[in-house]
Image: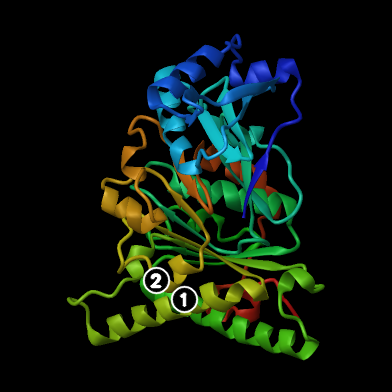
């Protein structure tokens, strides 16, 4: 579930972070827009427009509240946001719940935000990014799985690293990771000796072995839950969470040029990931599945259907955007701003995701570095924090 978090702002803090500008009264512009769009109703021969009944100056935006003539529908009001946004060149949000609310934000989404500036939050949450409305977070205990798409070098892997760092810093004793880094282990191999990282697989064959261990663990956990009468980890005394991260899931898609054995292995990888997406959430498993160019083959249907949080960075086509978030828009994200992403849940919004580099991540997680036994001699249980 997407969560909105507004910083406890003072005027000075807001100005420093957002570069606050002088507020402008847009009442006349809004009224002109009503007239141009003919937003109103004929009442006894007179065309009646929405009437301003309140204006509320907030720290980050100004809210205009209008009383709407009886009979005006939500459909009649839909064009207002697009027209006002283009006219005023400001971020605008229009909602209609008995009253018509028009929120005009004072500032744009920043072009860069740093991980060190992310507010501290409790729970199984991670930062998604910041926009004109402030910081936004996602709670993995409310929505356990997510997908991330986007062409290379636009922020996908950096977002994974910020999520991983945030979780380890706040849940050092309760979080563990299985990482399938199908870029040859180049991105996450350096973190293999972090205590919370059970395993880093760097090839499809290693991914298959890791996912088999995940399946064994899931079966054990399911038996424990049944024995104790638990139906969801959130309502149980179990504190631990296991995150399965797949970076570049397209490498697990079978292709006709492969041998039968290779195709069978990859199909089994996709089957286990689909099972994690279907039933793993209730057991404390969280899946984060990433791919550069999402298609029906590279983004398994069960994974997509059970990941209610969908994130995408820039994509080359509208078709890819449709696959990634069931909507257009990723193809229109700016090509000159790295880290700009669309967040899609029951609503859609654009954020600037937090930037963390490997030097900062390594420095923050160095305290959790441990010596681990040779992979050939490790047991399955050593790859995970136990859930017994």
Which-is-in-front pick, marks 2 and 1?
2
Q: Is residue 168 above or below residue 364?
A: below
Name the side, left or right, on which 246 lies relative to 263: right
Colour scheme shown: rainbow
First along the sequence among labels 2 and 1: 1
Name the side, left or right, on which 245 lies relative to 219: left
Name which residue lies at 60% across and 64% down. 144
Name which residue lies at 76% across and 20% down. 10
Viewport quadrant of the C terminus? bottom right
Q: Is residue 70 above or below residue 44?
A: below
Viewport quadrant of the N terminus? bottom right
Name the side, left or right, on which 361 lies relative to 231: left
From this viewpoint, is residue 338 visible? yes
Secondary structure, mark 1, is helix
Q: Residue furthest front?
A: 44
Name which residue lies at 44% across and 73% down. 302
Q: Position of residue 320 (x, y in %)?
A: 30, 53
Crowding at label 1, few (<14), some or many (≥20) Cα neighbours within 10 Å?
Answer: many
* C-alpha separation, residue under disc 2 versus residue under disc 1: 8 Å
Q: Position of residue 362 (x, y in %)?
A: 59, 45
Q: Nearer the viewer, residue 273 or 40?
A: 40
Which residue is labeled 2 in the image? 301
Secondary structure, mark 2, is helix
Q: Are marks 2 and 1 in contact (CB under 8 Å)?
A: yes
Name which residue lies at 72% across and 88% down. 226
Q: Is residue 208 above or below residue 82?
A: below
- Residue 168's image quarter? bottom right
Q: Which mark is residue 274?
A: 1
């Amino acid at each position: 579930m997407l969560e909105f978090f507004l910083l406890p702002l003072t005027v000075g803090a807001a100005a420093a972070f957002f570069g606050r500008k002088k507020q402008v009264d847009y009442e006349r512009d809004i009224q002109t827009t009503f007239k141009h769009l003919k937003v109103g109703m004929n009442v006894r021969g007179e065309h009646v427009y929405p009437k301003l009944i309140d204006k509320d100056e907030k720290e980050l935006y100004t809210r205009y509240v209008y009383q709407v003539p009886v009979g005006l529908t939500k459909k009649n009001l839909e064009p207002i946001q697009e027209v006002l946004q283009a006219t005023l060149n400001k971020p605008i949000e229009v909602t209609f719940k008995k009253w018509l609310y028009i929120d005009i934000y004072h500032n744009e989404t920043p072009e860069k935000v740093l991980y060190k500036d992310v507010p501290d939050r409790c729970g199984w949450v991670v930062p998604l990014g910041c926009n004109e409305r402030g910081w936004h977070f996602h709670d993995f205990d409310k929505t356990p799985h997510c997908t991330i798409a986007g062409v290379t070098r636009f922020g996908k892997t950096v977002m994974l690293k910020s999520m991983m760092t945030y979780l380890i810093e706040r849940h050092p004793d309760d979080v563990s990771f299985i990482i399938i880094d199908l870029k040859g282990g180049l991105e996450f191999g350096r973190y293999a000796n972090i205590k919370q990282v059970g395993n880093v697989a760097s090839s499809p064959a290693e991914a298959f072995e890791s996912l088999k261990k995940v399946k064994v663990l899931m079966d054990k956990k399911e038996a424990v839950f049944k024995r104790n009468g638990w139906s969801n980890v959130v309502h149980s005394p179990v504190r631990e969470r296991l995150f399965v991260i797949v970076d570049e899931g397209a490498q697990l898609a079978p292709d006709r040029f492969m041998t039968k054995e290779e195709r069978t292995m990859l199909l089994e990888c996709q089957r286990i990931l689909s099972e994690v997406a279907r039933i793993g959430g209730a057991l404390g498993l969280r899946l984060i599945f990433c791919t550069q160019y999402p298609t029906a083959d590279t983004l398994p249907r069960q994974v997509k259907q059970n990941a209610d949080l969908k994130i995408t960075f820039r994509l080359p086509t509208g078709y890819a955007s449709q696959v990634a978030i069931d909507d257009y828009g990723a193809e229109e994200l700016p090509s000159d701003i790295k880290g700009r992403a669309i967040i899609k849940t029951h609503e859609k919004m654009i954020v600037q995701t937090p930037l963390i580099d490997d030097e900062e991540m390594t420095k923050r997680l160095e305290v959790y570095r441990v010596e681990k036994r040779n992979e050939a001699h490790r047991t399955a249980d050593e790859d995970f924090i136990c859930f017994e």
